[in-house]
Amino acid sequence: MTRVNEPQLFNFNGQPTLDSREVAKMIGKKHAHLMRDIHRYISDIKPDPKLDSAQFFIESNYKDANGQFRPCYLLTKQGCEFVGNKLTGKKGTLFTAQYVNLFNDYEKQLVARPQFQIPQNMAEALQLAADQAKQLMAQQPKVDYYDNQMRNPGLMTVTEIAKDYGMSAKDFNKLLHQFGIQYRQGKHWVLYQKYADKGYTQYEAFAYNDNKGVHNNLKWTQKGRKFIYDILKEQGIVPKLEQMELLPN
């Protein structure tokens, strides 16, 4: 069983990666110092047209305790090998053993994932998706945390959910605000506190600049989608598909 404090992989565009903050902990180095080293590695790689630094180190960011975005990197397996080769003695051996186990376990979990059933109607589809998403989180080890949390194909944008109701994202966000689900904070919509820890939304990494940078976007989980469905249905608002089913023959 994986312990909570063990390093966790993040599935970025289909490939597992390891956050540079995790790597820094694993090798006993300050994150700032590891970032300095990675910048130097990238600088050494750039002159060679046959090499792409993004195959090793992918630019990303994270929010610190003060809510400020700070730079970090996502290291691919090749990136971990790159760092591991720079280490000597026991420290290098332990790091190599750790990251090799992480990536191998990740690949095994991909093979073992369960298949989804085919729902028969909209309500059943939403409930099934929410239940299976919950089961996946319980079954997958901590090492696969980012794959479930941030690259889960079940995550949806508000635009996608709004289309089910024949609405624009702008109008749908206002509707969710009207029913006390979310409020606007700067340029972003945020859930009210009573819903914030229910697992209705998650952050998903969004790649930009040819996959060399990452931003975190708020998306809705299947559980959250089911929550929205139930709230709106209580108000007599249902998806377009159900609106068609309610029309007289």
Image: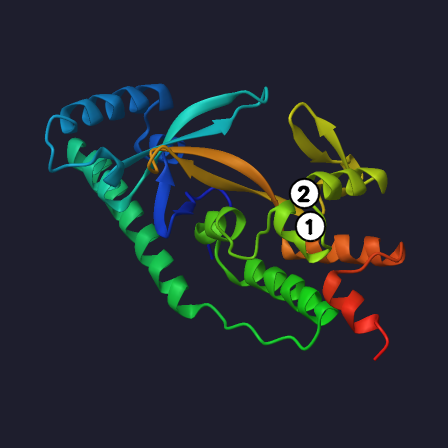
Residue denoted by label 1: 162
Please tell me whether mark 1 sits on a helix, a strand or a loop: helix
The spot of residue 55 in percent (x, y) is 24, 40
Q: Quadrant of residue 30?
A: top left
The spot of residue 60 in percent (x, y) is 40, 31
Q: Is residue 4 visible?
A: yes
Q: Residues within 10 Å of mark 1 (few under 14, many from 20)?
A: some
Number of the label disc, if any, that sits on residue 214: none
Q: Is residue 41 above or below residue 57?
A: above
Q: Residues within 10 Å of mark 2 (few under 14, many from 20)?
A: some
**Residue at position x 51%, y 56% from top?**
153
The spot of residue 116 in percent (x, y) is 55, 72
Q: Is residue 88 visible?
A: no
**Residue at position x 74%, y 62% from top?**
240
Residue denoted by label 2: 169
9 on left or right of 177 = left
Q: Earlier in the sequence, mark 2 or mark 1?
A: 1
**Residue type pointed to by label 1:** Ala
235 on left or right of 64 = right
Q: Quadrant of residue 201?
A: top right
